[in-house]
Amino acid sequence: RGLSRRGLLLCLGVAVLWRAVLVAAPPLLSNDINRYVWEGRVQVHGGNPYRWSDRPESPRWLPLRDAVYEGLNHKDYTAVYPPLFVLATRGVVAVDDSFTAMKAFLVGCELATLGVLALLLRRRRLPPERLLVLAWSPLALVEIAGSGHNDAFGLMWMALALLALLHDLERVGRHALLLDLGGDFGLELVAGLPGDGGGGGQREEAGDQQGLAHVRSPRRDWVPASINRSA
């Protein structure tokens, strides 16, 4: 029969408590969060993390150097994360320039993902206790709440895109994926859009026939079912 409503709420409460404890702790497994905080800080002070002259080791940012800077990897690199996430780091740092604030923001994204997944499960009439696959995942706990990785930001937008697709909002789902918001996921939508190079007309025609044609990730390619309806 699965968990009772009270049992599920208790399990989810424990999951939130675990995350609260880890958010308050120093980053566990990597220093990626240093980059998030640093790039947010550079934006708050009028810089552009994508600009070569605003890379971390630029003399312009000598006054900002502290433990966050010392923990950065690849100080000679400009920003590599997608623009929306970089803008989000600016908002976080504008409120509180700290690892704790950045981790709290990312855990908030993860909790928002759980909320969206709850709606998806309800609409599909699937057991709500499946939320615990993510909520009680040791990997998610350590990587997001513990280490402050930005995967949660990408998961949130992916879940929202799936919700939009489930509501038969093809345009919304297509655009949510097209923005490539997925942090380290590097999602790339190749929809039914005109191409830039040769054979653009053929690609456009194929796109008209297939609608959402192809989503590519760094790890594998997959082709979802067409969402285009025939007349």
Image (tube, rainbow, N blue to C red):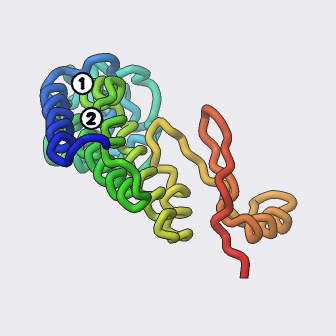
Disc 1 crowd, CA 10 A, few/some/many (<14, 14-19, 20+) = some
Q: Amino acid at mark 2?
A: Val
Compared with residue 18, is residue 127 higher up or lower down, i.e. above or below?
below
Comparing 157 with 94, the one in front is: 157
Q: Which quadrant does the C terminus fall into?
A: bottom right
Q: Which mark is residue 19?
A: none
Q: Image quarter for residue 69?
A: top left
Q: Amino acid at mark 1?
A: Val
Q: Image quarter for residue 191?
A: bottom right
The reply to whether dot 2 and dot 1 touch (C-beta < 8 Å) is yes
Comparing 60 with 120, the one in front is: 120
Compared with residue 91, is residue 183 higher up or lower down, i.e. above or below?
above
Q: Which residue is mark 2?
A: 37
Residue occupying the point 26% across, 18% down: 28
Give the residue furthest to the bottom. Answer: 231
Q: Which residue is mark 1?
A: 68
C-alpha separation, residue under disc 2 versus residue under disc 1: 7 Å
Residue occupying the point 67% across, 40% down: 221
Measured as percent of width and height from the top left, residue 200 is found at 81, 64
Residue occupying the point 53% across, 41% down: 186
Instruction: Give the SS element for disc 2.
Output: helix
Reading the chain from its start, which is encountered first: label 2 or label 1?
2
Compared with residue 199, is residue 64 higher up or lower down, i.e. above or below?
above
Left or right: 217, with 29 as reference point: right
Q: Is residue 97 visible?
A: no
Instruction: Give the SS element for disc 1.
Output: helix
Comparing 16 with 55, the one in front is: 16
Measured as percent of width and height from the top left, residue 98 is found at 17, 33
Measured as percent of width and height from the top left, residue 109 is found at 29, 46
